[in-house]
Image (cartoon, helix red, strand yellow):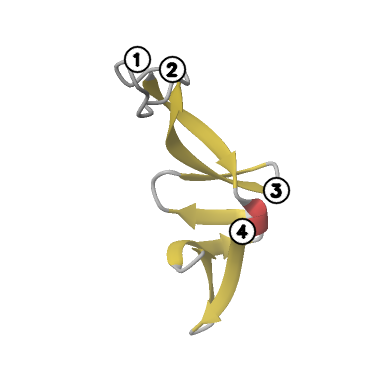
Amino acid sequence: MSFEKQRLDITDRVVGKFTDGQLNLYLEKEKIGQMVSENNYELKSGYEFNNSRFYQFADGLTGSDQKYVDCDDENGWC
């Protein structure tokens, strides 16, 4: 198994809130950026706006999907 950067589409989870005349963008309760002008956003590192969609880059596991379980006489792998 290894970690690999994955690009996740989070568009449906991004919420905009006006504060002091500025549109701030949030993913759940975390502020991820702000709108600078129409279709122009200033986002925190790890986020991207492309083709009218918001993306988050996150580490994801790749490779074998073996899982450890407690099995008799199998040393944990079954």
User: Which residue carries the number 3 mark?
Assistant: 52
State the separation of the CA atoms marked 4 and 2. 38 Å
Where does residue 25 sit, x and y in percent of width and height? 53, 65
Mark 1 residue type: Glu
Q: Where on the picture, by quarter, is residue 2?
A: top left
The tag on residue 74 is 1
Task: Give me the disc on residue 78.
Answer: 2
Contact between labelled residues 1 and 2, with CB atoms less than 8 Å apart: yes
- Identify the image quadrant of residue 12: bottom right
| Secondary structure found at label 3 | loop
Q: Which image quarter is the N terminus in?
A: top left
Task: Please state which of residues 20 and 47 is positioned toward the viewer in this rendering.
Answer: 47
Residue drawn 43% across the image and 64% down it: 30
Q: How far apart are the alpha carbons under marks 1 and 3?
A: 51 Å
- Who comes first in sequence, dot 2 or dot 3? 3
Q: Earlier in the sequence, mark 1 or mark 3?
A: 3
Q: Position of residue 5 (x, y in %)?
A: 44, 29
Write down the residue under mark 4.
Answer: 13
Name the residue type under label 3.
Ser
Marked residue nearer the N-terminal end (1 or 4): 4
Query: Tag 2: residue type?
Result: Cys
The residue positioned 42% from the left and 43% from the top of the image is 46
Q: Name the residue: 42% across, 25% down.
A: 67
User: Type of residue at label 4?
Assistant: Arg
Quadrant where the image shows the C terminus = top left
x 48%, y 55%: residue? 42
Q: Secondary structure at mark 4?
A: helix
Q: Which-is-in-front pick, marks 1 and 4? A: 1
Mark 3 / mark 4, whichever is N-terminal: 4
Whole-number angstrom distance, CA of label 1 to CA of label 4: 43 Å
How many other residues sit within 10 Å of disc 2, few (<14), some (14-19) or many (≥20)? few
Q: In which quadrant of the rendered view does residue 3 lie? A: top left
